[in-house]
Amino acid sequence: MTGTKQKPKAFATLCGRIFREADPQYFPAAQHRGRKIILCTDACLGAFLADPDVFCKVHRNSDKAAARMKKEIEHLIGLWSQYDPSAKSD
Ligand SMILES: [Zn+2]
C-alpha cells in the first residue's frame, strides 16, 4: 500500500462559511489583531481589508456559529474515520 490519503480537514472562514475536505492554505488569509483569519474568496478578503473592524462586527455572530459548526463537523469526521480503514493511523 502506497496510498497517502490525506485526512479530511474542516475549517471555518471569518465570514462564517464552513469548508470540509479543503486545505485552508489555498484560501485567502490575513492577520487581524494577532489572529490568523481565513476568508472564502478574494472578494471576501477585499471586503475584509477594506474595513476589518466593520467586517468582524458584521460577522461576529456567524463567526461564533461557524466555530460551533466546525466542532460538530470535526466530531462527524472523527466518526467517519472510524469507519474508514485507510484513515487509521495506529
Ligand atoms: Zn466569505
Image (cartoon, helix red, strand yellow):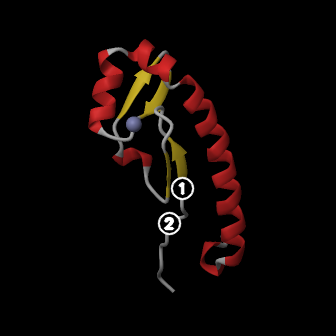
The residue lying at 49 percent from left, 72 percent from top is 5
Q: Using residue 49 as the reference point, say whether residue 70 is left or right of it.
A: right
The residue at which mark 1 appears reads as 9
Asked whether residue 40 appears in the rendered view, the answer is yes
Residue 86's place in the image compared with 13, above or below, is: below
**Does residue 51 lie above or below 70 as drawn?**
above
- Mark 1: C-beta under 8 Å from nearest atom of ligand 1: no
Q: Could you say where residue 1 lies in the image, as x and y percent from the top left?
A: 51, 86
Amino acid type of disc 1? Lys
**Residue 20 placement (x, y as % from top left):** 51, 56
Q: In which quarter of the image is ligand 1?
A: top left
* Residue tagged 2: 6
Identify which residue is drawn at 50% across, 17% down: 57
- Dividing the picture into quadrants, the one containing residue 30 is top left
In the displayed structure image, the side of residue 50 where residue 34 appears, left or right: right
Q: Which mark is residue 70?
A: none
Distance between the alpha carbons at the discs numbered 2 and 1: 9 Å
Q: In this view, does 82 lie to the left or right of 60?
A: right
**In this view of the protein, which residue sits in the foreground, 25 or 42?**
42
Nearest-to-viewer mark from 2 and 1: 1
